[in-house]
Image (cartoon, rainbow, N blue to C red):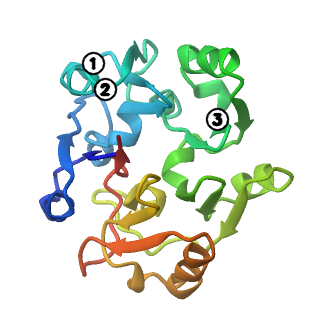
Amino acid sequence: MNKAILSTKRPQFAAKLREYGYEIIQSETIPCSMPYERDHADLQCLILDDTAFVLSCCTRLSEALFRDYHVISCGEKFNGSYPDNTCLNAEYCGDKLIGRVASLDEKVKAYCHEHEIELINVNQGYAKCSCVHIAENAVITEDNGIISALRNTEIDVFPIGKGSVRLDGAEYGFLGGASGYDRDKHTVYFCGDIDRHPDSERIKRFCEINHTNVISLSEDELTDIGGITFC
């Protein structure tokens, strides 16, 4: 993986990723979405193996992914309002997709059925925002519903406290939305300084146990930018 899809509203994160050798693909701006999430990549695309599901309104993003992925245009019911805005906001972990199944795009659900990807239903529409993916079968989350849903699976789920993540224009953000996992490099990147999170030492220890490197992209407070999608 040598490309990263993310919002460039806070350009310091993209600039730092370039220093690490990534080509930046800028997320799009969707006018009908809430101001604080109009440019969030984790609402605009979902990559499952060699297939990229992209909102039909994000034509530039589709074109950027076309050479490397089979791109499927979707989001016919997307209107910018919750929960319809979360049709692609799901966490792909191992052979499972974690998300609010009722809100997921029908093309995503059909793909999962065809490729034997198990759908794990949760109440949280912002499932990907709520999960920090740190290994093939390991996530960090503050969402009790996700913790409960994963309890009897092979996914190792690590609970943390809520808060401590900024989202401009909203009361709070999600740590998953302030991070991105490059599985090829076994590295999780945080948009801000993970040491400023109250559970930072526990988070870093969990990553260490899972042989995952931790990199903070700045010394600022953690900021939810809609996550980083590596591809």
Identify the residue position indicated by label 2 in the image: 68
Q: Which residue is drawn at 61% across and 59% down?
A: 139
Q: Nearer the viewer, residue 231 or 128?
A: 231
Q: Which residue is drawn at 53% across and 87% down?
A: 201
Whichever of labels 3 and 2 marks the residue nearer the N terminus, that label is 2
Q: Nearer the viewer, residue 143 or 171?
A: 143
Identify the amino acid type marked 3.
Arg
Identify the residue position indicated by label 3 in the image: 100
| Residue 150 percent coordinates (x, y) | 77, 52
| Residue 158 percent coordinates (x, y) | 67, 68
Q: Nearer the viewer, residue 76 or 108?
A: 108
Identify the amino acid type marked 2.
Asp
Identify the residue position indicated by label 1 in the image: 57
Image quadrant containing the N terminus: top left
Whichever of labels 3 and 1 marks the residue nearer the N terminus, that label is 1
| Residue 108 percent coordinates (x, y) | 56, 21
Q: How many other residues sit within 10 Å of disc 1, few (<14), some (14-19) or many (≥20)? A: some
Image quadrant containing the C terminus: top left
Q: How many other residues sit within 10 Å of disc 2, few (<14), some (14-19) or many (≥20)? A: few
Left or right for 54, reference 86: left
Identify the amino acid type marked 1.
Cys
